[in-house]
Image (cartoon, rainbow, N blue to C red):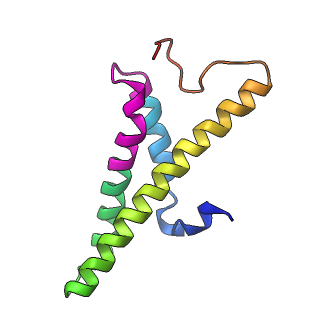
């Protein structure tokens, strides 16, 4: 099963954006263990911005569908970004480079 096939094509642009956000956070004093949670939050915000800019829910059913779409698409995009970072780390590890792809020299 290809999990990325569940990401809506118009929202797939969020994935590299989140990767860049993760790289920026990695260079900041923020604890690395918080990066996936921050990316999830930002992914949900970006999915919400796109979803609500294309159609405003007219009733409760549409609102619930929009909330479901926002949450699932935001989380899928964040997961894809973290997954992409892990793939790059694995490839670099096999090449003999054991460092984190987003490594800025800090530990933790």
Q: Residue at x 33, y 24 (%)?
A: 30
Q: Residue at x 61, y 67 (%)?
A: 5
| 43 vs 57: above or below | above
Q: Position of residue 94 (x, y in %)?
A: 79, 27
Determine whether 76 is above or below 53 in the image: above
Is 92 placed left or right of 102 in the picture? right
Asked if 41 appears above or below 2 in the picture, the reply is: above
In the image, which residues are magenta? 25-41
Instruction: Say whether residue 29 is magenta.
Output: yes
Q: Would residue 70 be found to the left or right of residue 84 on screen?
A: left
Q: Main secondary structure of the magenta part?
A: helix
Q: Residue at x 55, y 51 (%)?
A: 80
Residue 22 x, y percent position in the rendering: 44, 35
Q: Nearer the viewer, residue 1 or 66?
A: 1
Please give left or right for residue 51 compared with residue 36 in the image: left
From this viewpoint, which residue is outermost toward the right? 95
Q: Is residue 98 above or below residue 2?
A: above
Name the spot of residue 18 as percent of width and height, x first: 45, 45
Q: Is residue 89 magenta?
A: no
């Amino acid at each position: 099963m290809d999990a990325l096939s569940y990401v809506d094509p118009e929202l797939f642009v969020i994935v590299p954006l989140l990767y860049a956000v993760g790289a920026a956070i990695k260079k900041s004093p923020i604890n690395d263990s918080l990066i996936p949670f921050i990316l999830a939050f930002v992914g949900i915000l970006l999915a919400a911005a796109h979803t609500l800019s294309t159609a405003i829910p007219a009733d409760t059913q549409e609102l619930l569908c929009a909330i479901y779409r926002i949450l699932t698409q935001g989380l899928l995009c964040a997961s894809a970004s973290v997954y992409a970072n892990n793939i790059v780390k694995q490839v670099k590890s096999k090449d003999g480079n054991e460092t984190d792809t987003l490594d800025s020299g800090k530990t933790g």
